[in-house]
């Protein structure tokens, strides 16, 4: 357990001594609590989500049921469902790539989450052990963080935020469509609410709470300024975003899990495994 | 009277060892009480730095069971009962002796940071006017007691020793308190990116976790500063549409 220092004449700021730490082995720490539980949980949940979302995105079927469209497939630019904007699979789609409408759009929410400040901090720990947990030693001795390529690219997060706003609009429109059920006999559309409608409503609310609590948004609506007195609209917006931002982690997880659940719900209804109960 | 066992790291820069002490403890005692009792009764040469015993001066920083904490604010009743309590000095800084480290690097870093530069006075008598709500934001950062626990826990310093390239969370809090001040007109974004190395922070929030003053270091200081750096250096649209900064 020896700690030692050696003289280092090269250094300016840390002038007198240079530290040689006792904990150089990956995972060593003096902590006595179960520090590995949290990163392990994050690793398991996040990788399960990625595996499931990838699998679901490549399916290309069972992504709609009645008036519902799975959020993993929304907006459906091209596709065979009634939700498609521009008709069926385009001719220019390369033959060697499996076709699925989700592949056209899923990059956007994917990169939004990948560059999210909260997720960054948490996956650097859980997937890259950088650090595995606070005061626990790391596997690598070199470190560049977000100071240089490639992680410096994380700085474009705000651009994915702009795109995410459009997704919120599309998903809200999906909720609107999920209120209109087609009568199988007459073909008439009537207002209704099914369990699936509620699933999609909750999905938009959770994604809204996540997106509107974004750190970049907090900066853009008010954080950018040092004085908000005398700017009532900005001040209110800053306060609202800050309020959601305080629980950004919670919104991030709830919205992530619910997106997956919404897809599972639509998928199982479409496969006939679950029955979608109508409330009204 | 019940007793508790402490494993205290002893020794200086040349090497250290863990020594075990058992001492009587009473209800309401904090770790520093026990350390001072050990010093009084068993180890008069045990080096420990402290001043206020009230979480105000920031001098009793150490690592208790591997986590950076103030000894005077850590109650024995909050530690796992019946198990020996491990006490070590802060790992990120040069060790002087026993539990005392040399934190002077921090004071040298502080001198590098551009000072407060207020706009011209608002009134003829040389005074300024500020709205309370505008000051509230920086008020949080002024709670800092310079205990340097956040510097100690930050892996950029602790594990990677980037003392020349990275100023550490404490000083991002300090820069934030100046940069977001309603009167300040200085621009510190270039320094933040280059000399201060804000890009090395990977927002893993260990600093926030250990701050005894409950300052939301990562969410309220570092990330907003990162966003201001993005405005200046990484946002092509913003650069394209003029140099509008929106400050003040
Ligand atoms: S959030 Fe940044 S400054 Fe704070 S401990 Fe982590 S790397 Fe260091
Ligand atoms: S920010 Fe918090 S942890 Fe860091 S030096 Fe100040 S009071 Fe201590
Ligand atoms: S910081 Fe999490 S979504 Fe922007
Ligand atoms: S002795 Fe002052 S903070 Fe602990």
Image (cartoon, coloured by chain):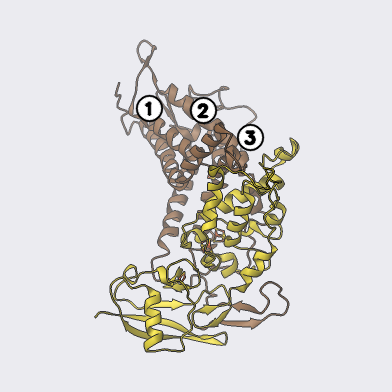
Chain colours: A brown, B yellow
Disc 3 C-beta below 8 A from ligand 3:
no
Residue A170 is tagged as 2
Q: Which SS class for mark 3?
A: loop
Mark 1 or 3: the one toward you: 1
Q: Earlier in the sequence, mark 1 or mark 2?
A: 2
Residue B133 is tagged as none
Disc 2 C-beta below 8 A from ligand 3:
no
Residue A197 is tagged as 1
Residue B87, compared with residue B233, is above or below; it is below
Q: Which residue position holds label 3? A: A94
On the image, the x and y values in percent for residue A227 come to 60, 41
Q: How many marks?
A: 3
**Residue lying farthest front?**
B125
Instruction: Tell me which corner region of the image, top left, top right, bottom left or bottom right, holds residue A223.
Output: top right
How far apart are labels 1 and 2 at the CA level? 15 Å
What subunit carries mark 1?
A
Other-residue count near label 1 (Cα within 10 Å), few / some / many at <14 / 14–19 / ≥20: many
């Amino acid at each position: 357990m020896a700690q030692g220092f050696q003289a280092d004449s090269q250094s300016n700021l840390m002038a007198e001594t240079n530290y040689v730490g006792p904990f150089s082995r990956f995972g060593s720490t003096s902590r006595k609590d179960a520090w590995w539980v949290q990163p392990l949980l994050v690793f398991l949940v996040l990788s399960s989500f990625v595996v499931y979302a990838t699998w679901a995105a490549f399916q290309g079927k069972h992504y709609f049921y009645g008036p519902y469209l799975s959020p993993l497939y929304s907006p459906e630019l091209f596709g065979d469902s009634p939700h498609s904007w521009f008709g069926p699979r385009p001719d220019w789609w390369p033959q060697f790539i499996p076709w699925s409408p989700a592949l056209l759009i899923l990059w956007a929410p994917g990169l939004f989450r990948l560059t999210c400040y909260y997720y960054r901090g948490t996956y650097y720990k859980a997937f890259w052990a950088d650090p595995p947990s606070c005061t626990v030693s790391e596997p690598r001795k070199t470190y560049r963080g977000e100071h240089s390529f490639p992680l410096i690219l994380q700085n474009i997060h705000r651009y994915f935020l702009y795109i995410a706003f459009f997704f919120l609009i599309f998903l809200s429109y999906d909720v609107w469509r999920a209120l209109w059920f087609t009568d199988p006999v007459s073909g008439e559309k009537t207002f209704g609410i099914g369990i699936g409608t509620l699933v999609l409503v909750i999905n938009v609310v959770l994604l809204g709470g996540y997106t509107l609590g974004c750190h970049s948004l907090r900066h853009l609506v008010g954080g950018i300024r040092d004085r908000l007195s005398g700017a009532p609209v900005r001040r209110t917006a800053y306060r609202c975003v800050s309020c959601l931002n305080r629980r950004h982690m919670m919104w991030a997880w709830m919205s992530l899990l619910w997106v997956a659940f919404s897809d599972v719900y639509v998928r199982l209804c479409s496969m006939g495994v679950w029955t979608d109960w109508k409330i009204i | 009277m019940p007793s508790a066992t402490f494993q205290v790291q002893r020794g200086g820069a040349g090497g250290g060892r863990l020594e075990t002490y058992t001492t009587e403890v009473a209800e309401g005692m904090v770790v520093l009480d026990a350390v001072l009792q050990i010093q009084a009764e068993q180890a008069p040469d045990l080096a420990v730095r402290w001043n206020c015993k009230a979480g105000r001066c920031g001098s009793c920083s150490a690592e208790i069971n591997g986590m950076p904490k103030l000894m005077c604010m850590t109650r024995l009743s909050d530690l796992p009962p019946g198990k020996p309590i491990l006490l070590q000095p802060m790992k990120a800084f040069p060790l002087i002796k026993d539990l005392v480290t040399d934190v002077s690097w921090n004071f040298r870093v502080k001198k590098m940071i551009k000072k407060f530069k207020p706009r011209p006075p608002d009134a003829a008598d040389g005074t300024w006017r500020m709205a309370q709500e505008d000051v509230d934001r920086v008020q949080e950062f002024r709670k800092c007691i310079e205990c340097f626990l956040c510097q100690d826990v930050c892996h950029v310093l602790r594990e990677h020793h980037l003392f020349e390239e990275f100023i550490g969370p404490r000083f991002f809090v300090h820069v934030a308190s100046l940069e977001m001040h309603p009167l300040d007109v200085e621009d510190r974004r270039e320094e933040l990116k280059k000399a201060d190395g804000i890009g090395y922070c990977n927002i893993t929030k260990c600093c926030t976790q250990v701050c005894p003053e409950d300052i939301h270091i990562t969410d309220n200081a570092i990330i907003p500063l990162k966003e201001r750096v993005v405005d200046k250096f990484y946002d092509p649209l913003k650069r394209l549409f003029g140099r509008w900064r929106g400050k003040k």
